[in-house]
Each structure stands twice: as C-alpha cells, then as structure tokens.
Image (spheres, rainbow, N blue to C red):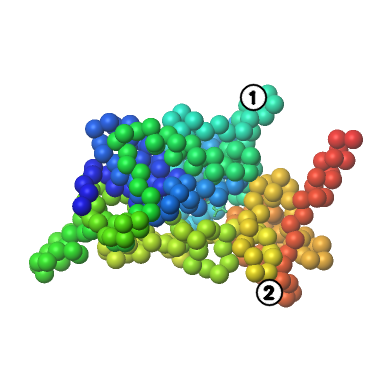
Amino acid sequence: MKTTDVLIIGSGIAGATAALKLAQNPQGRIILITREPDPHESNSRYAQGGIIGRGLDDSADLLVADILAAGAGASLPKAARILAEEGPGLLQEVLVGTAGITFDRDKGGDIEFGQEGAHSRRRILHVGDGTGRAIMQGLIAALQKYPNVALLTEATAVDLITYPHHSRDPLAAYEPIACHGAYVFDRKGKAIHRTLAAVTILATGGIGRIYRNTTNPPGARGDGLAMASRAGARILNAEYVQFHPTALSVPGAEGFLISEALRGEAGVLLTPEGRPFMEKYSPEWKDLAPRDVVARAIHTEMEAHDYSYVLLDIASHLFRVQARRH
Ligand SMILES: Cc1cc2nc3c(=O)[nH]c(=O)nc-3n(C[C@H](O)[C@H](O)[C@H](O)COP(=O)(O)OP(=O)(O)OC[C@H]3O[C@@H](n4cnc5c(N)ncnc54)[C@H](O)[C@@H]3O)c2cc1C
C-alpha cells in the first residue's frame, strides 16, 4: 500500500499540469500514475494544431462568446468564463514559465497566432505541427525535477476507493460518498496495490477509441469515466464526443488527423467532383465552422451522394498566395 497527499491518475496535459502546479508546494507529496510505459503517451502527445492563448485583438469576452456559440447551449457559462479569464495566464505561468515550452514566433519575434474553426480571432499558440509533443516533453521533463512528485508508469488505476462503496458496513451506503484513492494495477509486478490519498484527481482523458473511426490513440478508452461512474459520480455530457472532421481516408489504415489548421489557412472542403459545400451548411463560417457542424456536413454529403471520401483542397490556396507574391 502507498499513501500520498494527492494521487493524480493520468499524465497527459491535464494530469501533468495539475502535478506541476501542486508540486510548487514542497510539503505536498504527489503520486502521478499512467498506464503507459512512456509517460508522454496520451492524447495530448498527438495534438497538432495548438493551444488557445489570447490573440492580439482578443479578449476574455470574445473567447467566452466563441465558446458559448460553439457549445450550442450546452457549455456552462461560468466554466467558459474561468477558462477565458484564467487560461492565458496559466498557460504563460505553467507551460511557458515552469515547463519552458517555446511557442512559435514570427520573424519579428512576436508570437505567431494560428486560426482555427469557431474562433473569431487568431489565438492558437503552436510549436510547428507538433504542439502536443513539445508540451508533453516540457511537462514531463519539468516534473522530473521535483522530488515531491513520484511519476509511476505501467500503473493502471482499476477502481477508485470510495466510502461507502468499499465499506463492509451496510449502513454506510446512506452516507455521502468520499474518495480515498485508487486500486492500482502494477503491470510490471503483476499485482494490485491500494494507493490512499487525501485528494484524488482523475485525468484519464477521453473515450474516442471506442469508435471504429477515430484519430485518438489506443489509450483513449474512457477508464476514468467508467471508474467515476462506478464510484457514483454524475457523468455529464458524455454523449458529446468530438470527432476531428478531417482524417486521411486510406481503407484499412489508422485515421491520421489532417489538422484543422489547414482549414484555418484557407483549405477548402470539396466533393470528389470538386464542388465546395460548406457554404450551404454554414454561410457565415464556411470551412471554419465548429467541428460538429463540419463533421455533420461531410457526413450529410457522403450519405446523400454515396461518396466514400471528400477532399480538402489546400493547393489552390497556396497557388493563390504564390500568385499574389509574383
Ligand atoms: C490527433 C489529435 C490531435 C489533437 N489536436 C489538438 C489541438 O491541436 N489542440 C487541442 O486543444 N486539442 C487537440 N486534441 C485534443 C487534445 O489532445 C485532448 O483534448 C487533450 O490532450 C486531453 O488531455 P488529457 O490530459 O485530458 O488526456 P490525455 O492526454 O489523453 O491523457 C490521459 C492520461 O491518462 C492515462 N490513463 C488513462 N487511463 C488510465 C488508467 N486506468 N490508469 C492510469 N492512467 C490512465 C493515459 O495513459 C494518459 O497519461 C487533439 C487530439 C488528438 C487525438
């Protein structure tokens, strides 16, 4: 059995940034576990396009408005406000300051903000097209400098330890639920151990991999959602699984993401005959509509015309840029 102040389950960007922030208190002991042999392996590692910051002509109010519009009534305004107001400062403090991540700059040395769907401003910070890889490398390297953080790999949480769920007293079922850590399967030692913690943070990522077509890596199978549900937590909005609208269509191959940043730089979706179609579905945003709108539009076109794929045309944009340069 292990004991700790904070148990964090998952070492992607959510778990690793929580660990890094908490590690600033040298009195606090943190155990950070991941099921993977390599602590970088996670959805976070594969993020390409970038991460939301605050653009040049941007504000928290504009970001809140964009999030609520894209959320179509399901986003909690209070949560959107916290993200919009506190996010850019925390990004600077934790990712740039503590983890030392260098986001791309233009020739003049200013941060180069990218454009993505549903954003009314250029506000995406990136590191080439491997932003997630750079972030995970920075976070894991920074965490290894803190003696109060134990990073354990090949350690799979199998269930949360909760009172009264694991109590032998039948009357305990009437008491409020409290979490005291997790049962963790040590894959190297092939044994399950209890890890008791004053606070447990579930940061196990998404569930995309349960679908046949996905851009998510094999680890995104929803362990945390299942554990939380068994422990009696209320699971909200689990039906909203976001799909990247564009992935390479090669029969039998993994769906390699074709980054949204391509549409941010004026890539246009076309039918196999070369007909642009996004204007019909989103006259205002066209190819930069929110992902659910773009994914539905592609699906509708494919169903209606029996297409097995659609095209993403970036070449004519590049050609136009070159033509303007000459
Ligand atoms: C191809 C791709 C591109 C993307 N591009 C972008 C982008 O450009 N910008 C953007 O904002 N978002 C992007 N995303 C989405 C983004 O990557 C995720 O929203 C984000 O990484 C989620 O972070 P997380 O820490 O919550 O989960 P993850 O990064 O998935 O981390 C989950 C962690 O939990 C661990 N874990 C899971 N189950 C267990 C268990 N039972 N026991 C122990 N550990 C466990 C995993 O090993 C992992 O360490 C992209 C996603 C993909 C797949």
Q: Which residue is mark 1?
A: 109
Judge: label 1 CB < 8 Å from ligand 1. no
Judge: label 2 CB < 8 Å from ligand 1. no
Q: Say what secondary structure mark 2 lies in.
A: helix
Left or right side of 134 for 318: right
Residue 303's label in the rendered image is 2
Residue at horizontal 69 percent and vertical 54 percent from the top: 287
Left or right side of 67 for 106: right
> Which quadrant of the view contains residue 36?
bottom left
Residue at horizontal 43 percent and vertical 52 percent from the top: 37
Placement of 289 over or under 125, stated as above or below: below
Give the image location of residue 76, x and y in percent: 42, 52
Q: Earlier in the sequence, mark 2 or mark 1?
A: 1
Q: Residue flagged by tag 1: what amino acid is it?
A: Gly
Placement of 282 over or under 309, stated as above or below: above
Tell which of 188 and 41 is nearer to you: 188
Residue at horizontal 47 percent and vertical 46 percent from the top: 40
Give the image location of residue 127, x and y in percent: 60, 38
Q: Say what secondary structure mark 1 lies in.
A: loop
Q: Disc 2 vs disc 1: which is toward the camera?
A: 1
